[in-house]
Amino acid sequence: MSLENDAQPVIMSTDNTTMEKLLESIDRNRLPRHVAIIMDGNGRWATSRGLERSQGHIEGVNTVRRITEIASEVGVECLTLYAFSTENWNRPKAEVDALMHLIGIAIQRETPDLIKNNVRLTMIGDFGRMPEDARKRLQGCFDDTAHCTGLVLNLALSYSGRWDISRAARDIAREVADGALNPDEIDESLFASRLSTAKLPVQDPDLLIRTGGEVRVSNFLLWEITYTEIEVTDKFWPDFTKEDFLKAIISYQKRERRFGKTSQQITNQ
Ligand code: IPE
Ligand code: IPE
Ligand code: MG
């Protein structure tokens, strides 16, 4: 199986009229500014078809392309995709190696289209823990898309919420030890500013989508999802379509975000 020859056309799963109708139903004034996705179910998608798990990851890259396109088209400002968690390093070495190779190849291959669509690639996670080859290809794409002003495509790679929170705590402790920071200055906003998501145009996701049916957070954006609206779909990531993404936004737009207040307070705002 060659990871290099995996470019496949993105198939529209429904006709254009369905897409148009969904696009029309979206209120452009109430878009989620930051959408985060736990892209789960690649392995199950593959094994249910008698394929190797890595085939599911390859197919998952096509979904990444589709969802990046639609997020950018609709006007989402930031799309954070959970692609590899700190805990995923504990998977069999062959799967980890195949995933790392695929990530590097896919990033390099997609860079021209990202530039064409004005998409800027960023990353949160332990960059230094990534293999050198993937690091080089990622850095190339960060540099080549640094001028892009549209959607920010933020990959969570070798990332976990606890990893980031403990790293931020360490940085803050160092600043205090160096005398650069007074402990009394440490509040929620200072702490948030030391998390790796601080560089994003919008730090906290408005909408979190998880594919693959599991109703859990799996160490993703623990600080940032405090008031995020959550959508879980049973569909495996390779089967997730542009229409599914638009439906998740429509469902998000039907919700009342109360942030601890009463419904009456929100309607009278
Ligand atoms: C998500 O799919 C991709 C990664 C975690 C890298 P999985 O590989 O977790 O697929 P399932 O959940 O085993 O089906
Ligand atoms: C979450 O999926 C991590 C990513 C999608 C990268 P997992 O497959 O690792 O999550 P668990 O183990 O089922 O919680
Ligand atoms: Mg999984």
Image (cartoon, rainbow, N blue to C red):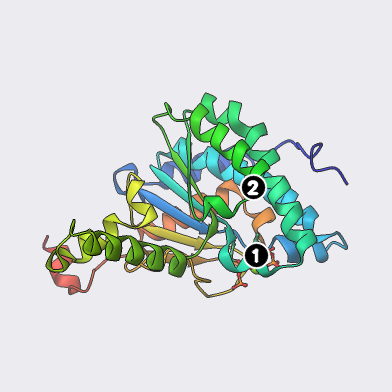
**Residue 115 in the image: x percent, y percent?**
52, 26
Indicate whether 137 appears above or below 267: above
Indicate whether 32 appears above or below 232: above
Foreground residue among 63 and 101: 101
Residue pictured at 47% horizontal, 28% vertical:
118
**Residue 77 in the image: x percent, y percent?**
38, 42
Foreground residue among 116 and 22: 116
**Residue 239 in the image: x percent, y percent?**
68, 55
Left or right position of 199 against 92: left
Residue neighbourhood size for the residue with mark 1, other residues' Cα within 10 Å, grouped as few (<14), some (14–19), many (≥20): some
- C-alpha span from label 2 to label 1: 23 Å
Q: Which mark is residue 63?
A: 2
Q: Which mark is residue 234?
A: none
- Ligand 3 visible in quadrant: bottom right
Foreground residue among 111 and 243: 111
Residue pictured at 61% horizontal, 50% vertical:
241
Q: Amino acid at mark 2?
A: Thr
Left or right position of 173 against 232: left
Mark earlier in primary sequence (2, 1): 2
Q: Which mark is residue 89?
A: 1
- SS label for mark 2: helix
Residue pictured at 43% horizontal, 37% vertical:
151
Foreground residue among 67 and 267: 67
Q: Amino acid at mark 1?
A: Trp
- The quadrant in which residue 222 appears is bottom left
Indicate whether 73 appears above or below 172: above
Indicate whether 126 appears above or below 9: below
Query: How many marks overall?
Result: 2
Looking at the rendering, in which quadrant would you find the C terminus? bottom left
